[in-house]
Image (cartoon, grey):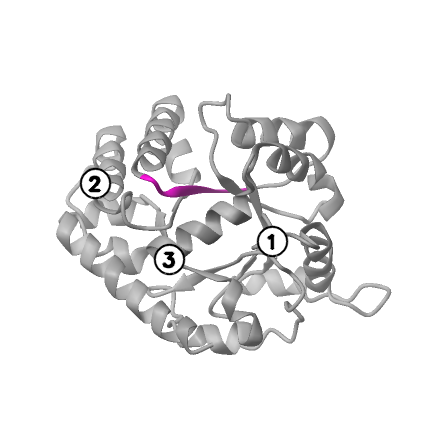
């Protein structure tokens, strides 16, 4: 089984360093002239998938915006995942799950077991019940060639109180997360399968990301305030591992498919310019 890290490395090499979110929140559906209902959700997801699925390395559906419509919304999510994978994109499901014991094992089975109807290439996860509590996710991901992106340093202002708190050994909580993920990726080539989420809007982190040897997902670009140039400040020497992530900056161009593709191409060009200068 080829690792997620290897598949991600190849996808970024072939299609470029870009992740685009599918975030069908009510305001965006309205902007597109779609109703805030299951039909509008389906039209939105299908439009983004058909426009970008065959050209973007990674597509990141936000699960909550599908789940809010109940079983019908989840059915659309399942269909969207299938369509994206058929088009050749890697699918990173933004679910931010985190729990303990049999519950986190069930989450792992839901998203990282290929037999599941919502199986994806990778998921986001919250480590704040302890990174070790996510072990079932890491184990199933490794078994089936999947990936896990663990929250480390997020853009929301509330996160700092927890993430930058100091532990007994003087490290921040976030740095302990970084260090534990680094251990999981030790020796992996060309890239580890376990990544971190580090917001593109947070500026100089003051944290050491140099040993991660895995992908660094950078949300917050575009409409959320960060520019591609900000990636240099946030990631410094770790730029080679960065996977820039855009959502509204690209999605606001819809529903015209050509406009969506043009917006994604502009975002990719901006990121290439920064990452090429690393």
Query: Is residue 194 one of those drawn in magenta?
Result: no
User: How many discs mark residues in the rendered view?
Assistant: 3
Provide residue 89's location: percent of width, then percent of height.
Answer: 36, 43
Bounds of the magenta span?
Answer: 88-96
User: Residue 141: horizontal and vertical position, in percent?
Assistant: 60, 37
Q: Circle 3 is placed at which residue position?
A: 18
Q: Residues within 10 Å of mark 2 (few under 14, many from 20)?
A: some
Identify the element where label 3 is drawn.
loop
Give residue 220's quadrant in the image: bottom left
Residue at mark 3 to residue at mark 2: CA–CA distance? 18 Å
Residue 68 lies, in percent from the top left, at 39, 33
The residue labelled by disc 2 is 47
The local crowd at label 3, few if under 14, some if 14 to 19, many if 20 or more residues have their Cα within 10 Å, is many
Instruction: Identify the residue shown where x is 47% and y is 35%.
Output: 120
For label 1, the SS is loop
Residue 189's spot in the image, x, y percent?
Answer: 60, 53
Most common secondary structure along the magenta stretch: strand
Are the two marked residues, 2 and 1, in contact with CB atoms closer than 8 angstroms? no
Residue 121 vertical position relative to residue 196 in the rendered view, above or below: above
What number is the disc on residue 59? none
Name the residue carrying label 1: 189
Q: Earlier in the sequence, mark 2 or mark 1?
A: 2
Is residue 130 in view from this perspective? no
Left or right, 122 with reference to 194:
left
User: Can you tell which of label 3 and label 2 is closer to the viewer?
Assistant: 3
Above or below, comparing residue 11 to residue 69 in the picture: below
Question: Which mark is nearer the camera, 3 or 1?
Answer: 1
Of label 3 and label 2, which has the lower sequence position? 3
| Residue at image location 35% in from the left, 28% down from the top | 73
Magenta stretch: includes residue 94: yes
- Is 160 displayed left or right of 262 in the figure? right
Task: Please state, as top left, top right, bottom left or bottom right, where the N terminus lies in the image.
Answer: top right
């Amino acid at each position: 089984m080829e690792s997620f890290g290897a598949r991600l490395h190849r996808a970024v090499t072939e299609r470029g360093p870009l992740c685009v979110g599918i975030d069908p929140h009510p305001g965006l559906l309205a902007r597109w002239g779609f109703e805030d209902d299951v039909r509008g959700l389906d039209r939105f997801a299908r439009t983004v998938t058909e426009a970008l699925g065959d050209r973007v390395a990674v597509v990141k559906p936000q699960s909550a915006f599908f789940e809010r419509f109940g079983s019908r919304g989840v059915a659309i999510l399942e269909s969207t995942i299938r369509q994206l994978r058929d088009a050749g994109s890697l699918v990173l499901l933004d679910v931010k799950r985190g729990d303990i014991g049999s519950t986190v094992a069930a989450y792992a089975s839901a998203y990282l077991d290929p037999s599941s109807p919502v199986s994806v290439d990778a998921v986001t996860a919250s480590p704040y019940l302890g990174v070790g509590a996510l072990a079932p996710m890491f184990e199933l991901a490794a078994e089936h060639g999947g990936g896990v992106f663990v929250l480390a340093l997020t853009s929301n202002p509330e996160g700092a109180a927890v993430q930058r708190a100091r532990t007994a050994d003087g490290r921040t909580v976030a740095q302990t997360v970084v260090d534990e993920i680094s251990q999981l990726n030790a020796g992996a080539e060309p890239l580890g399968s376990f990544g971190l989420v580090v917001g593109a809007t947070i500026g100089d982190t003051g944290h050491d990301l140099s040993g991660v040897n895995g992908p660094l997902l950078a949300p917050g670009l575009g409409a959320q305030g960060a520019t591609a140039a900000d990636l240099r400040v946030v990631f410094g020497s770790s730029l080679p591992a960065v996977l820039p992530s855009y959502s509204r900056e690209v999605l606001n161009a819809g529903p015209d498919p050509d406009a969506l593709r043009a917006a994604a191409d502009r975002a990719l060009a901006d990121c290439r310019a920064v990452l090429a200068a690393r």
